Image (tube, rainbow, N blue to C red):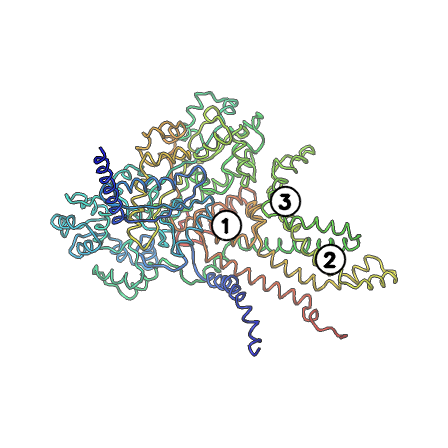
């Protein structure tokens, strides 16, 4: 008995020493990667997904017989301006984060300046799970015929109606159920919406200037109203496009809405919490928001969403209008580094992070839409009523802002023109004339004006 | 002790280094950047050379080189000896390369994904994406979308594909393929052409001089003179009250103004029973916005002038006041004939200092109206900040922003020179005649 004990102890000790020795001899390669992302409290999985991916990748290497250690350092930001300044300046100083989660509109300027490398050089787009990503999302992450990024999430900016008020002005439940389809087909337009909003005010359901509330601050949402009147942002050959007629109709729509008393002339600048508070408590008839705001409305503001609200695309308007919505996917980007191996690891990490089950964690946690078809079948994702219902109504009809290095300037000019007309600083004609002059002066040949 | 005359310089050296690093260098760099087209897209540290779709567009439209653009835009991947060797050197899997040679030697593909499909069809295909990528990267036979650090490398690469270039073509190519920034006067041309530039300039002058005359100098004078005639206790109390906005954090200070002004705020609540519909009083009209902006800035700005003027009045010999009272002078005459002439120097100082500070300050406007409604309160400094450091689409225009701030520097210096002339600076600083 004693001998046996001694022998087994000796064997155990020998094994332990051997194992330790082996571990010492091959402690494996170590990779340190940093991930910078816009990541508020609900967006933690933008970075955590990479950490999960690192764990899986280490195991894949181990199964193949290679020991690697991947350390992930997260750099979360909450403000876009601060985030962009930090990433670009760090890159200029030679210590860019290895992986960046940014907006797809960052692709063009960052690709041009050499800050990022094409993701397609480091990932296999023809293999799982990237071959299952919605094709229109991969289209959005392409620039000059190359795929520069992998979609990290998707969202959409729908139109909402407060159901009790709609019923009070004569809509039945069946009417409301069919409203989204009427909007999609062009049967219900922005002009109809203004009439209904005025009815709500006249009926005393909501106060003056609270018939229709779009986003209260600058944002890509306003391009949807340009598109609603038939406008296009690019000409199809990679050049920006200003359609003066559509832009004028879009500005005129907001001027009309102010004259009708449906919306205030100084709506832009309304504090966000006041905006959320009013529309989640029935003080606003119709509004335009973002799919991800569902989490805030039902959580922080305690809104019973499905009992009180219905949603649709943004209605079309004018003669050439079309119902539409906009998605601004955030994307995983790989930055240019001296070490090819690190960039390769980054590619493998963002591939794994795009696995449906991992991406669903972010989608459901932050009320974003998923990135791939298979994700719709993941229990967590399929079990979420909001995402399940919103995805098919919105995502197939979603367009995105173009990836163009001059788009940021176009955006600012469009928005300052809108604000000037909306607040009555300029007439629509003056605003459009100034927008045209400004775009010609700032962008020259890089924009087509029609 | 022989070195003592250098001691001062030596002691000041650290401060000098800081001044150069943190004050002089940024100003000089801003001056230089103002003459460039620097932006997020060009980067700051310099560019490289790349044949891309957007580079080919001006090659066609500006230089009429359609044929060359077509040639350069072609994408070819060929499995050849050179590529196989390079792949082996880069660490490509040996077995896969042998098989690739036997199955696909001399075959060409239209893009990299097709090459990778070929690699994946091999029995000895690498098991990782990285393994595949290492090999597929080596067979590119085109220049499109490849980044070259120098123009010579790009030219060598183009020559390798058998494309011959004329001198004109080389020049055109150097122009369109460079991704970095270049020196240009375009910023200043754009500035002159833009319709909003003049409006921003008028806004700036209005903001600076109204705030300055009404508050930073005018109201500061009123405060200091009226407290001068008060008993010491209450005078100190009033002065400290006017210092409170100065010591309140700007974000909180502006937030209180917003609470006062917005449509569920204090003003709306008070005015509603009088028949005024609730509204956002601050953003309701440009006039409202200006009233708030000037109040917000003026109430903070008056405190500094008040302190300086009060202490200057204290320094006036009391005998002057006593003598004037014996002569039967009124308060108004005292102010006009004693106080104001003695305050000429402090008034000059405050006017210059506050003009420069108002010209460059935009934080209260940014927090309060962000230039609204509809750009009505956008001043030059705010416009500079927005162009250079804030863009919703991420396209920051460093060059244009720097050019804008350069104009601000020129305005600041010119205004200061005008003041010195107006206040007769030479006479103010002349040695006293009596001593």
Other residues around mark 3 within 10 Å, as few (<14) / some (14–19) / many (≥20): some
Mark linked to residue B310: 2
Q: Nearer the viewer, residue A103 or A269?
A: A103
Give yes or no for contact between labels 2 and 1 (Cβ–Cβ under 8 Å). Answer: no
Other residues around mark 1 within 10 Å, as few (<14) / some (14–19) / many (≥20): some
* Upstream in sequence: badge 3 or badge 2: 3
Q: Secondary structure at mark 3?
A: helix
Q: Would residue A329 be visible to someone looking at this image?
A: no
Q: Is residue A414 left or right of residue B157?
A: right
Give yes or no for contact between labels 1 and 3 (Cβ–Cβ under 8 Å). Answer: no
> Of circles 2 and 1, which is in front?
2
User: In the orientation shown, which residue stands out farthest toward the bottom?
Assistant: B2
Mark linked to residue B288: 3
Q: Secondary structure at mark 2?
A: helix
Q: Is residue B283 left or right of residue B88?
A: right
Against A250, residue B156 (above or below) is below
Against A311, residue A103 (above or below) is below
Which percent across, then down, holds residue B374?
A: 55, 45
> Of circles 3 and 2, which is in front?
2
């Amino acid at each position: 008995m004693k001998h046996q004990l001694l022998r087994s102890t000796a064997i155990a000790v020998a094994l332990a020493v051997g194992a330790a020795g082996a571990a010492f001899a091959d402690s494996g390669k170590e990779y340190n990667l940093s991930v910078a992302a816009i990541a508020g409290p609900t967006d933690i999985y933008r970075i955590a997904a990479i950490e999960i991916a690192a764990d899986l990748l280490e195991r894949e290497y181990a199964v193949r017989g290679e020991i690697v250690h991947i350390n992930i350092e997260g750099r979360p930001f909450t403000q876009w301006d601060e985030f962009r300044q930090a990433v670009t300046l760090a890159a200029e100083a030679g210590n860019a984060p290895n992986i960046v989660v940014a907006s797809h509109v960052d692709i063009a300027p960052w690709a041009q300046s050499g800050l990022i490398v094409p993701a397609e050089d480091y990932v296999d787009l023809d293999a799982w799970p990237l071959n299952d990503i919605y094709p229109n999302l991969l289209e959005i992450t392409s620039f000059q015929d190359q795929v520069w990024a992998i979609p990290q999430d998707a969202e959409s900016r729908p139109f909402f109606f407060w159901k009790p008020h709609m019923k009070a002005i004569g809509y039945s439940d069946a009417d409301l159920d069919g409203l989204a389809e009427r909007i999609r087909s062009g049967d219900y337009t922005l002009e109809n919406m203004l009439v209904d909003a005025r009815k709500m005010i006249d009926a005393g359901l909501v106060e003056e200037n609270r018939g229709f509330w779009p986003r209260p601050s600058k944002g890509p949402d306003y391009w949807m109203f340009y598109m609603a009147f038939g406008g296009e942002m690019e000409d199809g050959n990679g050049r920006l496009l200003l359609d003066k007629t559509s832009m004028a109709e879009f500005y005129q729509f907001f001027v009309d809405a102010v004259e009708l008393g449906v919306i205030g002339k100084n709506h832009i600048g309304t504090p966000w919490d006041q905006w959320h508070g009013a529309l989640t408590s029935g003080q606003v008839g119709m509004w335009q928001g973002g799919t991800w705001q569902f989490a805030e409305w039902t959580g922080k503001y305690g809104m019973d969403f499905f009992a009180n609200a219905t949603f649709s695309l943004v209605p079309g308007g004018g003669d050439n209008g079309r119902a539409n919505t906009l998605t601004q996917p955030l994307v995983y980007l790989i930055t240019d580094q001296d070490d090819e191996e690190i960039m390769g690891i980054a590619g493998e990490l963002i591939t794994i992070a795009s696995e449906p089950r991992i991406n669903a964690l972010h989608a459901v946690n932050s009320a974003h839409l998923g990135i791939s078809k298979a994700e719709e079948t993941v229990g967590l994702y399929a079990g979420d009523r909001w995402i399940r219902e919103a995805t098919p109504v919105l995502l197939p009809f979603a367009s995105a802002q173009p990836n163009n290095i001059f788009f940021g300037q176009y955006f600012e000019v469009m928005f300052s023109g809108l604000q000037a007309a909306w607040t009555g600083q300029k007439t629509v004609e003056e605003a459009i004339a100034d927008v045209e002059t400004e775009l010609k002066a700032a962008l020259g040949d890089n924009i087509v004006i029609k | 002790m022989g070195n003592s005359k250098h001691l001062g310089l030596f002691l000041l050296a650290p401060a000098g280094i800081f001044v150069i690093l943190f004050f002089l260098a940024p100003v000089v760099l801003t001056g230089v950047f103002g003459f460039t087209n620097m932006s997020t897209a060009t980067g700051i540290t310099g560019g490289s050379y790349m044949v891309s779709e957007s580079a080919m567009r001006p090659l066609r439209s500006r230089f009429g080189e359609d044929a060359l653009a077509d040639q350069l835009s072609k994408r070819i991947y060929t499995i050849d000896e050179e590529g196989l060797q390079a792949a082996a050197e880069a660490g490509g899997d040996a077995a896969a390369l042998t098989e690739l040679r036997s199955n696909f030697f001399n075959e060409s593909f239209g893009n990299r994904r097709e090459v990778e499909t070929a690699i994946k069809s091999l029995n000895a295909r690498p098991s990782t994406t990285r393994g595949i990528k290492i090999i597929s990267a080596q067979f590119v036979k085109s220049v499109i979308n490849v980044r070259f650090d120098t123009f010579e490398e790009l030219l060598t690469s183009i020559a390798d594909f058998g494309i011959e270039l004329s001198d004109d073509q080389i020049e055109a190519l150097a122009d369109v393929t460079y991704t970095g920034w270049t020196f240009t006067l375009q910023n200043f041309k754009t500035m002159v052409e833009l319709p909003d530039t003049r409006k921003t300039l008028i806004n700036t002058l209005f903001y600076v001089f109204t705030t300055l005359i009404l508050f930073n100098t005018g109201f500061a004078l009123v405060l200091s003179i009226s407290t001068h005639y008060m008993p010491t206790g209450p005078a100190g109390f009033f002065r400290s009250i006017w210092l409170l906005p100065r010591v309140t954090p700007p974000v909180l200070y502006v937030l209180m103004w917003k609470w006062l002004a917005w449509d569920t705020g204090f003003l709306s609540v008070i005015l509603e029973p009088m028949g005024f519909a609730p509204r956002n009083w601050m953003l309701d009209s440009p006039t409202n916005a200006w009233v708030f902006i000037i109040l917000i800035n003026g109430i903070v700005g008056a405190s500094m002038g008040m302190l300086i003027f009060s202490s200057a009045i204290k320094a006036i010999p009391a005998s002057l006041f006593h003598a004037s009272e014996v002569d039967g002078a009124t308060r108004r005459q005292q102010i006009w004939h004693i106080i104001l002439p003695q305050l000429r120097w402090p008034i000059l100082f405050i006017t210059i200092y506050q003009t420069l500070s108002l010209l460059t300050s935009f934080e209260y406007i940014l927090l309060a109206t962000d230039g609204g409604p509809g750009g009505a309160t956008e001043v030059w400094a705010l416009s500079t900040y927005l162009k250079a450091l804030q863009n919703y689409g991420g396209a920051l225009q460093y060059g244009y922003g720097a050019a804008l701030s350069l104009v601000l520097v020129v305005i600041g210096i010119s205004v200061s020179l005008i003041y010195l002339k107006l206040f007769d600076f030479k006479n103010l600083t002349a040695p006293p005649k009596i001593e």
